[in-house]
Image (cartoon, grey):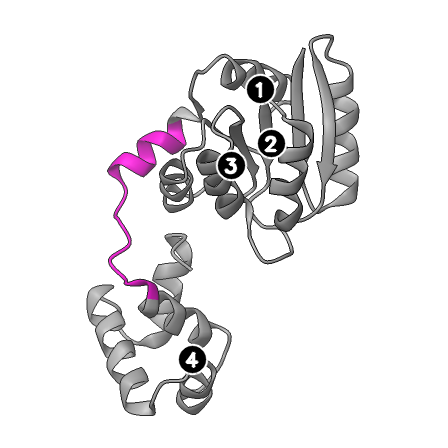
Amino acid sequence: MIRVLLAEDMHLIRGALVALLGLEPDMVVVSEVSSGDEVMPEAIRHGPDVAVLDINMPGGIDGLAAAALLAERLPDCRVLILTSLGRPETLRKALSAEVRGFMLKDAPPAQLADAIRRVAAGERVIDPQLAAAAITGRQNPLSLREVEVLRTAAGGADLSEIASTLHLTKGTVRNYLGAIVTKLDARNRLDAVRIATEAGWL
């Protein structure tokens, strides 16, 4: 019997997934959680074979951070990411967090059970088109700090607000934004936000 931990913040989707997996004769959902913070304590408590994690969840850590923690502390628990964020950059981050599977939420239901079985057996399960895009796609040229600055700018903050939020001087923020525009070969700050958002870097 494959023991599954399910982490999904949307109650309707989580309930549907629990019901779906409950129909499989060789699976049991031993725990269902709605935030990234709950993943590790529940995994320690129940010892699942596979953790099925959404990426965007409330709490202090997201699905990718939870996956990295599981890989470090409970390596026998394999992780399958189930997400609507089908971007090459997201897949690259997931692979660096040592996930074994990466599936999109719009995949046919039967594929999820099959993916869980394969991940539990030690296989790697990744959407082939997304894998190809991750290999051939452009890598994020921005540093973590530059991403932080651009993400804050994307929310509509002006120079002073960005500086205040990130505890930087306005001159430093101006320098970061200039470097970002140059690295992304963008026309201006708005264009940089568009490019980075479409690439999945924000």
Amino acid identity at mark 3:
Leu
Task: For marks 2 and 3, give the one nearer the viewer.
Answer: 3
Task: For marks 3 and 1, give the one nearer the viewer.
Answer: 3
Q: Secondary structure at mark 3?
A: helix
Residue corresponding to mark 3 = 70
In terms of image quadrants, where is residue 184?
bottom left
In terms of image quadrants, where is residue 198?
bottom left
Q: Which residue sits at x=51%, y=31%?
A: 74
Task: For marks 3 and 4, give the one nearer the viewer.
Answer: 3
The reply to whether dot 1 and dot 2 touch (C-beta < 8 Å) is yes
Between discs 4 and 1, the one toward the N terminus: 1
Closest to the observer: 4 or 201?
4
Between discs 1 and 2, the one toward the N terminus: 2
The reply to whether dot 2 and dot 4 touch (C-beta < 8 Å) is no
Instruction: Answer left or right for 57 relative to 134.
Output: right
Residue corresponding to mark 1 = 116
Amino acid identity at mark 2:
Val
Instruction: Answer left or right for 138 relative to 62.
Output: left
Q: Secondary structure at mark 2?
A: strand
